[in-house]
Amino acid sequence: MSLALKIKNLRNSSADFCFIPFKNAFQPYLVLFLVSMSIYVNTLTHEVAFDDVSVMLKNEYVIKGIKGIPDILTHDSYYSYYKQMGVSNGLPGGRYRPLSQISFAIEQEFIGTIPDGVSNNQSWDINQNGVQDQIEDTNEDGIYNEYDFMIRGAGLRHLINVILYALLVLLIYHVLAFFLFPSAKDMVFFACILFSVHPLHTEVAANIKSRDELLSLIFILATMLFSFRYLKSGTKKHLFYVGLFMLLALLSKEYALLLFIILPITLFVFEPSKISFKEVNFWVLLLFTTIATVAFIWFFNSGTLIAVPLLFLYGGYYFAKTSKFPITKIVYLLGVSLITYLGLRFSATIHELKVESFKGDIIANPYMFASPTQELASKISVLLNYFKLFFLPSPLLADYSYDTIPYATFQSVSVWISLFLFFGLFLSAIFLVLKRSKGSFPLILILGFFIPVSNIFIDLGAVMGERLFFHASVGLCLLFSMLVFGLINKIPKSLTIFGQAIKISIIILLIIYSTLTIIRNPDWKNNSSLFLADVVKAPNNVNILSAAGTAYYQLAILPKNAAQSKYYAKKADSCFTKSISIFNGYFPAFMNKALNYVVLNELDSSLKYVDYAQKLIPGSQNAFGFKKSLSEKFTLHGIELFEKGNKIEGLKSLSNALKANKNNYRAWNNMGKALTIIGDLEKATLCFRSALQIEPKNSISIKGITVIDSLKQITIGRVSKK
């Protein structure tokens, strides 16, 4: 059936709503789509922010466009970024989420690609004519640099994100309203519109990188949708789509693994005739899936690579085919998708079996300074933090790393409230599932999607994140809606005024949340707007402080801010200094502080801090490149000082030029000239010879040595005459 015909049928069908006066079944879809689009329409003029650079604009495979797709599929998602930064992957097991990056590569094909995939400070030159054409200054800041290339086409990327977000909301409504809660469409509609406007989702919708979250949830729901359709139709086409969408969900993000738990429990509650936990085939197939998965994980690099999928595909197919229950066939297709995904993932990422705890800096290892009991207590308290943000979404932050949320202890009341809340949800879920109550479904979603991101079983390298609660929030929106409408339905007709009061409260809540979302969206325009807003709300966050300092630095170097350059540079330095005082092992803070000292014209301090940065990450290409640039600045400054007659400071500056880059032959030459002027001919000769070792054909060194030889001859002649 075509989409147009489906819409026509919806328009001809009754709405089946009790409280909301929709005229037909199509109007709820239209309202949800329009609300979801309009709530994020102010993101369409945004640029890039936060992790956008690492997953897209510093990813050579994305920048190559469609030609880079094979490399995206065969490499860790951060491989290219880490390679360009000159560092190793800090996350054990790596990250493999190629689907969103494939979508970015396709967009890049329309935006404009770079053949070698490496953007640089000349990438702004679209027509490669070497002229700074006005159209090439994409953000119109008066500076032609790599950032102009980075934000080109950002509007298209944001538009696609907003459309995906709106389609996701429609998909949530469709699955819930037509397959799980067909007699409670008012309740489902409120849950969906609450999800649509909730401020907690601004990061996912307004940040391009978070498309992986959108795609993951879309394809998880699509897998569930076609599972339900297969249960009704029994057609192989729908079963094929179950496997396809499961694979796409896994390629988006790992959340889809939870479908092995969520789908059987959901069918047990909603479609008990389609599943039997007493059937042997079902459990054998799950066992086959587990064996195949474990074997893949443990023996991927050995000779069993071919045997594992064959064992599962052939053995599992028999049990799926002979099963009397559709769920067994669905689980088989989920297993096929999982094995395919694992094969792709382990071929692309560094496959490590024994993973130790994070040993990186405080950003990758937020519990570095916590005792074991503090770490456990802090992880437990996170659930309460998420619930707080759901009901009171302020303050919202792009980053919750050290030291935004202080370490908790088991003496903290919040830890015990969080523990009580978690076990309350867990025990309620078990009780309601056994009773086959529909109220169990939101609890399954909350717990199922929260536990993997809770840090209890898997270290994420992050305390918490708004995007990490995105999937679980579907369940929380649904649970809240069920409680509200359950209360409305229990109010006697004689007390309709209370029911009206609740409905008015719902409208007010939606207006407040919509307003907060619209207000928060502009913060995500770029890094400057984001971190300058967030540093006020999180003044002790190491990462945000460093990023805010960078934002002030960017303001300091803008041509239009020339009169205020020092003011912004001092603000930047204050942020970097505070970030370092909280954690003195954070590379970006040291590196950016060094950059900022150039604006303040304090080159000695700049060299000092880039040296600190290089000690933290010796192989950093950024630090190496900056020191080369700094060496040139020291050289020019040294020449200037010498010309002004300040020979001591001039020599010091030239010496620093060589400390910054011992391969700077220009610095060696100028040091040689300076030493010649002050009469230290032996050292001058050594300098010129050092320059010749680096650049054998440079005429200045050759001429300098010739001049020194002449001076020596003159000196010898004078001595001999005496």
Image (cartoon, rainbow, N blue to C red):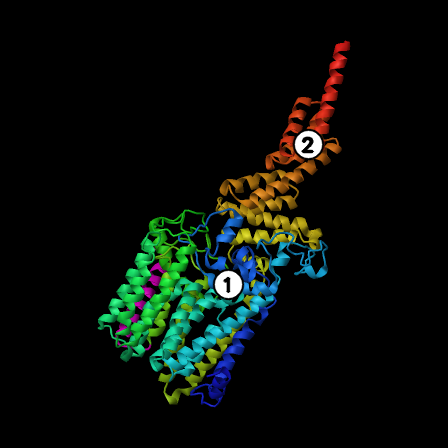
Q: Quadrant of the C terminus?
A: top right
Say whether disc 1 or disc 2 marks the residue closer to the N-terminus: 1
Residue sitting nearer the eye, 103 or 661: 103
Q: Is residue 617 visible?
A: yes
Q: Which residues are magenta?
A: 411-438
Nearest the viewer among 431 and 720 is: 720
Left or right side of 507 for 658: right
Residue position for label 2: 669
Q: Which mark is residue 563?
A: none
Is residue 55 inside the magenta stretch? no
Instruction: Say left or right for 698 vs 479.
Output: right
Q: Quadrant of residue 528?
A: bottom right
Name which residue type carries label 1.
Answer: Ile
At x 35% / y 82%, what residue is drawn? 233
Looking at the rendered structure, which numbered label has been put on residue 102?
1
- What is the secondary structure assignment of the residue under circle 1? helix
Q: Which type of secondary structure does the marked residue at label 2 adopt?
A: helix
Give the amino acid type for the residue marked by disc 2 in the picture.
Asn
Expressed as whole percent of the image width and height from the top left, the position of residue 127 reads 69, 58
